[in-house]
Amino acid sequence: MTLYQFNMLNEFEQAEAVWSGTHIGERQDDEHSILLYQINSFYVEVYYHQEDNAIRRMRSFSSTDQLAPYLGQIDIGKL
C-alpha cells in the first residue's frame, strides 16, 4: 500500500490498515496520546483522546523529517 492509496481509504479502512502496521513510537500532547505506526514506506500518527476514548484524527506522511518528536525514544545502545 502506498501513502496515496492509504489517503484514498475511508476512516474505517484506514484504521484497519494502521492496526496491521508496525507500532514504532508514542508521544503525548495536551489532550492526546499520539501513536506512530509504519505501513510500508510511510507513517501514520493516530491521535487518541483518552478522556473520550476515541480516535480524533490520523495524520499520514512519508517524510522522515516528521519523525523528529520520536527520535529520543530510540535506543541505540545495542547498535
Image (cartoon, grey):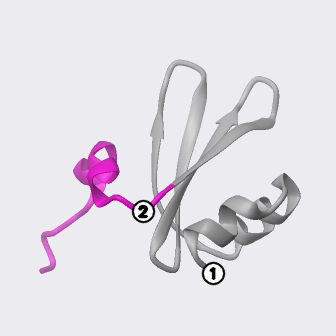
Tag 1, which secondary structure? loop
Magenta stretch bounds: 61-79
Specify few, some or many for label 1: CA neighbours under 10 Å numbering under 14, 14-19, or 20 or more. few
Q: Is residue 72 magenta?
A: yes
Report whether 61 appears left or right of 32.
Answer: left
Tag 2, which secondary structure? loop
The x and y percentages for residue 41 are: 45, 76
Front residue (pair 53, 4):
4
Residue at coordinates 84% horizontally, 57% vertically from top-left?
10
Q: Which residue is mark 1?
A: 1
Query: What number of labels is visible?
Result: 2
Q: Which residue is mark 2?
A: 62
| Quarter of the picture holding the N terminus | bottom right
Amino acid under disc 1: Met
Report whether 49 appears left or right of 25.
Answer: right
The x and y percentages for residue 72 are: 23, 49
Report whether 79 appears left or right of 60.
Answer: left
Disc with the residue nearer the chain's start (1 vs 2): 1
Specify few, some or many for label 2: CA neighbours under 10 Å numbering under 14, 14-19, or 20 or more. some
Name above or below for residue 33 compared with residue 15: above
Amino acid under disc 2: Ser
